[in-house]
Image: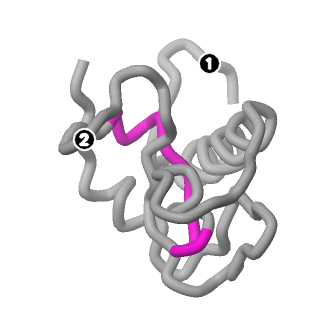
Amino acid sequence: MRVISKKLRESARDRNCTLRLNGCQYDRGVVLAHLPCGQKGMGMKGPDVIACFACDHCHSVIDSRIRGEYTGADLLRALAETQIYWLEKGLITVKGAAA
């Protein structure tokens, strides 16, 4: 399923990086970075809901444009922090969830 959301992509503006890998620039050039999830490849992006806020450095590491290390736990933490933000701001909802 392809999920593309201009609002989710724009939500990265003025946010801090949620990946925070070694060399992180925290709040410089933060964009919505699609996480490697098996549906990603050259010229292909995963769904916008499988993404996190990432500075240029951290984004470059997960996209293998520069060398760096990360773990699955780094990706999961960043994804969770990003999705919690979206839930709090009403950018994503869960049907039937109690408030």
Residue 97 tag number: 1
Which of discs 1 and 2 lies nearer the camera? The answer is 2
Place of residue 64 in the rendered image (x, y in percent of width and height, measured from the top left): 50, 53
Residue 11 falls in image quadrant: bottom left
Kind of residue at disc 2: Met
Reply yes or no: does residue 56 show up in magenta: yes
- Quadrant of image for the C terminus: top right
In primary-sequence order, the first of circles 1 and 2 is: 2
> In screen coordinates, is 15 left or right of 38?
right
What residue sits 54% from the left and 13% below the top?
A: 96
Query: Which element carries disc 1, helix, strand or loop?
Result: loop
- Quadrant of image for the N terminus: top left
Q: Is residue 97 above or below residue 90?
A: above
Residue 80 falls in image quadrant: top right
Reply yes or no: does residue 88 show up in magenta: no
Residue 2 tag number: none
Query: Which element carries disc 2, helix, strand or loop?
Result: loop
Place of residue 42 in the rendered image (x, y in percent of width and height, measured from the top left): 24, 41
What residue sits 43% from the left and 36% below the top?
A: 49
Could you say which is closer to the camera, residue 16 or residue 44?
44
Q: Is residue 73 above or below residue 58?
A: above
Place of residue 29 in the rendered image (x, y in percent of width and height, measured from the top left): 49, 82
**Region in magenta:** 46-57
Could you say which is closer to the camera, residue 66 or residue 38?
66
Residue 42 tag number: 2
Dot 2, crowdedness within 10 Å: few (<14), some or many (≥20)? few
- Give yes or no for contact between labels 1 and 2 (Cβ–Cβ under 8 Å): no
Could you say which is closer to the camera, residue 29 or residue 99?
29
What residue sits 30% from the left and 34% below the top?
A: 41
